Image (tube, helix red, strand yellow):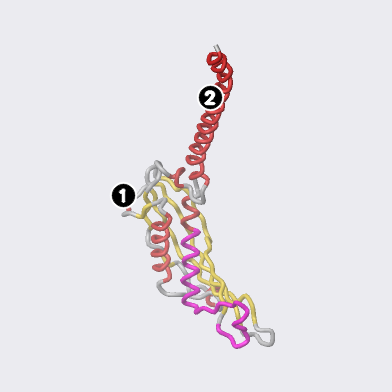
Amino acid sequence: MKNKSENYACRPARQGLLSNRQSHKVHFFFLFAICCLLATALPGCGYTTRSMLYGKYSTIYITPFLNKVDVIQESYTANKYRIYRPMLETDITKKVINRYLFDGNLKPVKEDEADLVLKGELIEYRKDPLSYTSDSEDVTEYRINIYVNLKLWDKKENKIMWEENNFNGNYSYFVKNSTINPGNNVVVVSEGAAVNSAVEDLARRIVERTVEQW
């Protein structure tokens, strides 16, 4: 009788232990379910929009950019900051293709294999002064501005997705000048390096404009 009464006495404790274990299991599965939901939802909240592009558009053809800079135009030649830079349109085309490859949302392919076609025209290249020395008119800082006209064509539906003029990429830089103190964290670069950075900025903006449309 003593052993039987002891067993009855222990039964509520065992039941409480089992209840606690079941409660822990419920909490574990609840947390696991939340983690799974977050894992599927978070990729869609990232910087790019891969999930929205997926299944609809996957390839793009980048038409070589055309140079439409009119160097003969009087208003262009009268402005000393509007400059003609040979082969700049070729550099833009290469940088845009490389940026699409880096981004990964749209794969650059041949025109007959593409879902989308990007067409672009270089219309202006500027080298605008931003700051001067305090005691003279020597320029210490410039900004490179590159302007293009863009058009994105949907080959599947045979229509223009969007069109944007005067699309801009830019980069600011300091020139070599004796009045600049190297200790002021001023980075001095050549004009060629600044142009390259401006083209990269333009390419980045073009790709973002394309993939963030949807």
Of all residues, the one furthest to the top in this rendering is: 1
Taking the spot 45% from the left edge, 47% from the top edge, the residue there is 50
Of all residues, the one furthest to the right in this rendering is: 135
- Whether residue 74 appears in magenta in the rendering, the answer is no
At label 1, counting other C-alpha atoms closer than 10 Å, the crowd grade (few under 14, some 14-19, many 20 or more) is few
Taking the spot 55% from the left edge, 18% from the top edge, the residue there is 11
Identify residue for label 1: 113
Secondary structure of the residue carrying tag 1 is helix
Of all residues, the one furthest to the front in this rendering is: 2
Distance in Å between CA atoms under marks 1 and 2: 62 Å
Identify residue for label 2: 18
Query: In the drawing, does residue 167 fall left or right of residue 184?
Result: left
- Foreground residue among 105 and 76: 105
Residue 181, horizontal then vertical, whole percent? 62, 84
Taking the spot 47% from the left edge, 50% from the top edge, the residue there is 211
Magenta stretch bounds: 176-205
Q: Earlier in the sequence, mark 1 or mark 2?
A: 2
- Foreground residue among 78 and 99: 99
- Whether residue 191 appears in magenta in the rendering, the answer is yes
Residue 68, horizontal then vertical, whole percent? 45, 66
Residue type highlighted by circle 2: Leu
Query: What type of secondary structure mainly makes up the magenta span?
Result: helix
- Viewer-nearest of discs 1 and 2: 2
At label 2, counting other C-alpha atoms closer than 10 Å, the crowd grade (few under 14, some 14-19, many 20 or more) is few
**Exactly how many numbered labels are in the figure?**
2
Residue 139, horizontal then vertical, whole percent? 61, 82
Q: Is residue 145 above or below residue 204?
A: below
Quadrant assignment for the N terminus:
top right
Q: Is residue 40 above or below residue 119?
A: above
Residue 161, horizontal then vertical, whole percent? 46, 47
Residue type highlighted by circle 1: Glu
- Foreground residue among 30 and 3: 3
